[in-house]
Image (tube, grey):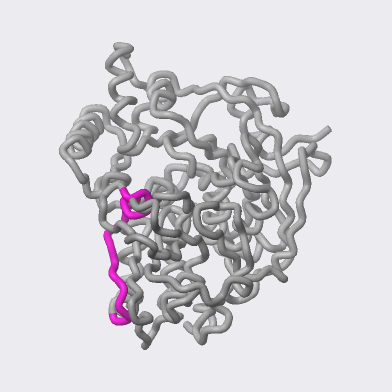
Amino acid sequence: MGHTIAEKILGNHAGGQPARAGEIVIADVDFAMIHDARAGNALKMIEKLGAKSLPHVKRTALVLDHYSPPPNMEAANTHVEMRAFAEKHGSPIYDVGDGICHQVLPEGGHLTCGDLVVGTDTHSTTYGAFNAFGTGVEGTDVSAVMMTGKLWFRVPETIHVDLRGALQPGVWAKDVTLAMLGKLGAEGANYQALEYAGSGVAAMGIDDRMTLSNHAAELGAKAAILEADEKTLAWLKAHGAAAPKPVKADADAVYAQRIVIDTAALAPQVARQHHIDDIAAVPEVAGQKIQVALIGTCTNGRLDDIRQAAAILKGRKLAKGVRMIVTPASRAIWLAAMREGLFEILTAAGASVEAAGCGTCVNITGHYIAGDDQVVISSANRNFKGRLGNPKSEIWIGSAATVAASALTGVITDARTVAGGDWRAAA
């Protein structure tokens, strides 16, 4: 019997031989990340344990992205502690406005194909877009990684997902993940690895692949891994990553489940209010009135997402009574979007652009709180009741293209029906 990508990567880091699903392994971690919402306990644990050395500390990035900017004194003081720790120990640090952890780690060249990467956020599955095993852990786990360079894992079973056919213009990886949620349900892949493959993956750009791996967290996935191809290797090289060690599944690998999705026939999807797995095709719910549109977060705040919005809104205005907020995933994306003139287009249309960070997504910073009975259409990753600070508001989830088209019309709208709905054709 052959092995999956997850089994191979974990096995390679735990003695060199492929592991089997269900086994417990102690594995060497290539890189770790801790963000400000989890850093306090992690740094206290290191002090409590009296660690005499931190051999892995220079391979652990500190990211100030959730409390960005800090909304209170406690958060501000956590930032002070993180900066002091990084200065003392030489850890890479990404400060307020640099961006969201899952974007800045790949951009910073901190990971490559075949790596094992952990971070204090469930969306650390994002790193699987680069043929790495990325997964979320607790802050105290990262303390252990900084002290030992190791962490234990139960090797997950793997679900193989075959995406067949290039997505239609106006349909994106976001729609694939929402379709997966409709099929499996939230937590439907709990502690399993997703292994995405097929012509649908090959046709995607890196931004879409990152969305595909990132959004697997809502399925409960332990990891979401893609094979490496020329696009992967070129992107990693351009960002200064170490020499890649691509990992492929064996032809006779054993999977817990196999799923086939006809991506060429897929329509835009949305998750309805309060439930990330209550999925409908956009044409089924078109006409639902909205008051707020949000584009951004670690899931869909990349350059392609901002391009989608700008292509739809160029030369137009938001619908009367609609507000729109755009939050890029990193400073590098912010600057690229500015250079391309995308922010001028969006601002002229009536949108507001924020600095890169997580604050709006989880309402930590209080930059936006939805009003009673307001309906938000968002490209974020979660829509549970009260996510934006008010349990009396509704949040619907869709792609950046769906969000922009809906902001233009004032009702949930299929981007394929709006001129400019394919930014690639509009460019």
Q: Residue at x 63, y 52 (%)?
A: 181
Instruction: Report the residue at 51% width, 71% height from top.
Output: 402
Q: Which is more toward the observer, 141 or 188?
A: 188
Asked where in the image residue 6 lies, by quadrant, the reply is top right
103 vs 77: above or below: below
Q: Position of residue 355 (x, y in %)?
A: 27, 59
Between 343 and 217, the residue placed more toward the observer is 217
Whether residue 197 is situated above or below residue 304 in the rendered picture = above
Q: Where residue 14 sits in the image (x, y, percent)? A: 60, 23
- Does 419 sit left or right of 407 as displayed? right
Residue 269: image quadrant is bottom right
Q: Nearer the viewer, residue 366 or 102?
A: 366
Q: How many marks?
A: 0
Looking at the image, can residue 308 be seen? no
Q: Residue 138: in sight, yes or no?
A: yes
Q: Is residue 211 above or below residue 52?
A: below
Q: Is residue 391 left or right of residue 82?
A: right
Q: Is residue 227 magenta?
A: no
Position in image of residue 185 (x %, y %): 64, 48
Q: Residue at x 55, y 46 (%)?
A: 218
Q: Which residues are magenta?
A: 348-363
- On the image, the x and y values in percent for residue 298 come to 43, 53
* Picture residue at 54% right of the left edge, 79% below the top: 422
Q: Which quarter of the figure is the N terminus placed in?
A: top right
